[in-house]
Image (cartoon, rainbow, N blue to C red):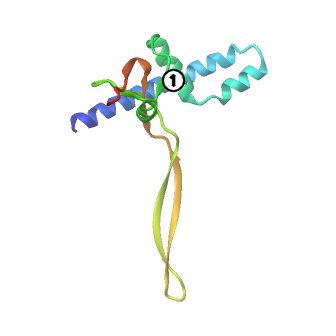
Amino acid sequence: MTQKQMQREENFRRLQAVSATAKKLKDAMCNNAATDAEIVALESRPLNWFILKLYRKENPEATDFRTFMEWKASGYSVKKGMKGFPVWSTPKRSETKITRERQDGTTEEETVYGHENFHMAYLFSDMQVEETKQKN
C-alpha cells in the first residue's frame, strides 16, 4: 500500500469515527430540544453539519469551512502542507453503459444507474488559507 493510500485509509477511519460521534451528538441534541420544531430542524440537518460542529469544537479558531475550489473561487489559496478535514461528499450515483441488441439487429446504448454512494471529500478552514496575491 502506498503512502497516499495509507493516508486516505487513515482519513476514512477518522471520518467513520467522527461520524459515529456526530450521530450521538445529533441524538443528544434532539433529546434535549425544547420544542417539536427544534427537533424537526435538527433531524433535517445533514450529518456533515454535526461533523463540522465537532471539528469547530476541536479547532475553535476555525469559523469557516469550504472546499478547495470554493476557497479558490473566493480569491484564497490553501497554505502549503495543510490537510483537509474529511467529510461526506454529496451522493454520487454509479452509472454503467450497456449495449442492447434490438430485434431488428440494430443496437442501442443504454445507461443503467446503480445506487448512490457517499464518498469522502475534504474541507479546509479559514485558518488554513491565505489571500491569493494578485499579479500586476
| Place of residue 125 in the rendered image (x, y in percent of width and height, measured from the top left) | 43, 21
Q: Quadrant of the C terminus?
A: top left
Instruction: Give the residue furthest to the left.
Output: 2
- Which residue in the structure is indicated by mark 1? 51
| Place of residue 103 in the rendered image (x, y in percent of width and height, measured from the top left) | 54, 86
**Horizontal relation, residue 64 to residue 1: left or right:** right
Relative depth, front residue between 100 and 69? 69
**Horizontal relation, residue 20 to residue 85: left or right:** right
The amino acid sitting under disc 1 is Ile
With respect to residue 41, does 113 lie above or below?
below
| Place of residue 115 in the rendered image (x, y in percent of width and height, measured from the top left) | 53, 51
Residue at 46 percent of width and 30 percent of height: 74
**Horizontal relation, residue 82 to residue 104: left or right:** left
| Place of residue 98 in the rendered image (x, y in percent of width and height, measured from the top left) | 46, 69
How many residues crowd mark 1 within 10 Å: few (<14), some (14–19), many (20+)? Answer: many
Relative depth, front residue between 4 and 114? 4
With respect to residue 116, does 89 lie above or below?
above
Relative depth, front residue between 17 and 102? 102
Residue at 52 percent of width and 43 percent of height: 91
Residue at 42 percent of width and 29 percent of height: 75
